[in-house]
């Protein structure tokens, strides 16, 4: 069983939790950017899509 709080979080607790999540996501983003840079610089692999293109927009023809 996990330690999930049964009471709703106070606004201050919620802000702290969201700040922690934001910090983790920023760290993940920095890691992914570093991996992409190494792939490009060391192996010549281009990973990023050109701006303005979305594969989802063309698929939503209902």
Image (cartoon, rainbow, N blue to C red):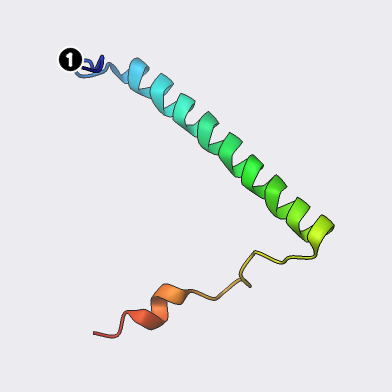
State whether residue 21 is above or below residue 41: above
Q: Is 56 in front, or is 39?
A: 39
Q: Quadrant of the C terminus?
A: bottom left
The part of the image, by quadrant, that contains residue 43 is: bottom right
| Nearer to us in this view, 10 or 36 | 36
Residue occupying the point 47% across, 25% down: 20
Q: Residue at x 67, y 49 (%)?
A: 33
Q: Residue at x 40, y 23 (%)?
A: 17
Q: How many marks?
A: 1
Q: Judge by depth and name the residue closer to the eye, 14 or 2.
A: 2
**Residue at mark 1:** 7
Vertical order, 12 against 61 (above or below): above
Which residue ends up furthest to the right in the rendered image?
A: 42
Residue farthest along the left direction in this orientation: 6
Where is 57 relative to 13, above or below?
Answer: below
Looking at this view, name the residue that lies furthest to the bottom.
61
Quadrant of the rendered image containing residue 57 = bottom left
| Image quadrant containing the N terminus | top left
What residue is drawn where x is 31% and y is 79%? Answer: 60
Seen in the image, is 15 located left or right of residue 61? right
In the visual, does 43 lie left or right of 20? right
Q: Position of residue 37 (x, y in %)?
A: 75, 53
Q: Position of residue 61 (x, y in %)?
A: 29, 85
Classify mark 1: helix, strand or loop: loop
25 lies left or right of 4: right
Label 1 crowding class (10 Å Cα cut-off): few <14, some 14-19, many 20+? Answer: few
């Amino acid at each position: 069983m996990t330690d999930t709080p049964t009471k709703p979080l106070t606004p201050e607790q919620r802000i702290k939790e969201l700040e922690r999540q934001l910090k983790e996501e920023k760290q993940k983003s920095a890691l992914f950017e570093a991996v992409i840079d190494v792939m490009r610089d060391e192996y010549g692999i281009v990973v990023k899509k050109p701006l303005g293109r979305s594969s989802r927009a063309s698929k939503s023809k209902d």
